[in-house]
Amino acid sequence: MDTSGESALSIVLDIVVLALFVGVSTRPLWSRALRRPWPAVAAVVVVGVPSLLQFAWPALGSALMREPGETLRHGEWWRVLTALLAQDGGIAAAVFNLLVVAIVMLAGNAVWGWWRAALLFLGISVVLNLAALAWQPGGGTSFASDGLLMASSARLALDGARARPGAAPGRGLGAGGRVRMAAAVQLAAGVVLIAAGDAHGVALVLGFAVGALLPAPSACAAAGQALPRPARGEAS
């Protein structure tokens, strides 16, 4: 299975998934996220420093990268964690990936709270890097970012479905309906990528499943305010 994320299909669908999430997430969610940006800042610094240093010091990238042979034959199991800090797509991809980390950690903190968002980010990355030992060498933040993004998308869709089912017939989709439709398209993108042999599809589907199955944290009650109350005349 391809873990590089360099195919045209992978690039396009990952951008679509991110754009849908940003596009349907409403202003109160981002306002809440920006009031507490420090988890996103910390994530960008922790990931960004070694990710960018490797372009001046290539040996650092080699030491951090996921290498199935070194891990399985020589016991270098730290690589399933440190692969998150390595970049295998060049400097432009590294900078873009750090921007995505900032976005998904901002939203993840608003939806899950900082420590749950951090666990989802790290946990999904480790699980996928373990699975990728059967696939190919590599590194990067895309597994972690895709997983946390989809976990947040699933949580918001489920919260919106329970709290505010959408607009009445003839008035189009309400905010909750738009979030649920976006989540369905994002999940479909993950399935398409899996069918195409792209490991990023696994990250998207796994993240969605984890977000849907985890109990909603108390922070989600506040994040549910991201879905505005229906206007008068709409279903409540």
Image (cartoon, rainbow, N blue to C red):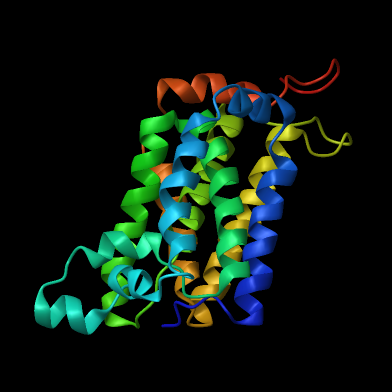
Picture residue at 58% right of the left edge, 25% below the top: 224
| Quarter of the view holding residue 193 | bottom right
State the image coordinates of residue 35 (x, y, percent, origin top left).
60, 21
Is residue 164 something that shows in the picture? no
- State whether residue 200 is above or below residue 37: below
Q: Residue furthest top?
A: 232
- State whether residue 208 is above or below residue 70: above
Picture residue at 20% right of the left edge, 63% below the top: 78
State the image coordinates of residue 77 (x, y, percent, origin top left).
17, 67
Quadrant placement of the N terminus: bottom left
Quadrant placement of the C terminus: top right
State the image coordinates of residue 26 (x, y, percent, origin top left).
72, 32
- State whether residue 210 is above or below residue 29: below
State the residue in front, 166 or 22. 22
Left or right? Give the position of 226 relative to 152.
right
Picture residue at 18% right of the left edge, 75% below the top: 71
Left or right? Give the position of 179 relative to 97.
right
Q: Residue furthest right?
A: 170
- State whether residue 171 is above or below residue 20: above
